[in-house]
Amino acid sequence: MYLESAKRFNYHLTMHHTIEETYIFPILGKRMRQFSESEGLHLESHKGIHEGLERLKALVQQYKTEPSTYNPTEMRVCLDSFREVLFSHLDQEVEDLRGDNLKKYFTLQEVENIPI
């Protein structure tokens, strides 16, 4: 169950970022440089997170294929390798998408029309 949870975590976070990068960041990035493709701190964070998720995916596949190779220390090192970038990213996204910050760039109607 633990490895399935890790696999689902990986899948859901990857899908979440894919949706953001495809549909939401291009709209936000037109007015908010932190979401832009050229200067986007959020896209840069996604890259770091996805590098960690790729390592996690490989480990989970290995452990599921060969359960005797499971190493909790190795798993922890993998998860810790992208912990800082993940939590910093989440904190920054919350800050950037706060209502009082978002209204500097968009009207309520524009925000409601973002395909979420």
Image: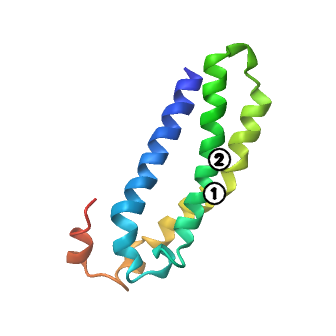
> Which percent across, then down, holds residue 76?
74, 36
At 67% from the left and 31% from the top, the residue drawn is 59
Task: Tell me: 110 left or right of 101.
Answer: left
Counting every numbered tag in the picture gives 2
Task: Tell me: 6 left or right of 13.
Answer: right
Location of residue 8 with respect to 15 vertically, above or below: above
Task: Tell me: 71 left or right of 84.
Answer: right
For disc 2, the marked residue is 52
46 and 113: which is toward the camera: 46
At 33% from the left and 63% from the top, the residue drawn is 23
Tell me the element at label 1.
helix
Q: Amino acid at mark 1?
A: Gly
Kindly check if marks 2 and 1 are in contact, taking CB atoms under 8 A apart as contact.
yes
- Position of the C terminus by quadrant: bottom left
Location of residue 61 with respect to 28 vertically, above or below: above
Tell me the element at label 2.
helix
- Position of the N terminus by quadrant: top right
Q: Looking at this rendering, what residue extends furthest in the right direction?
A: 73
Residue 68 figure quarter: top right
At 56% from the left and 72% from the top, the residue drawn is 41
9 and 18: which is toward the camera: 18
Q: Residues within 10 Å of mark 2 (few under 14, many from 20)?
A: many
Residue 2 figure quarter: top right
Q: Looking at this rendering, what residue extends furthest in the top direction?
A: 68
> Which percent across, then down, holds residue 56?
63, 38
Q: Which mark is residue 114?
A: none
> Which percent across, then down, holds residue 37?
48, 74
For disc 1, the marked residue is 48
Location of residue 41 with respect to 21 vertically, above or below: below
Location of residue 47 with respect to 64 vertically, above or below: below
Q: Amino acid at mark 2?
A: Gly
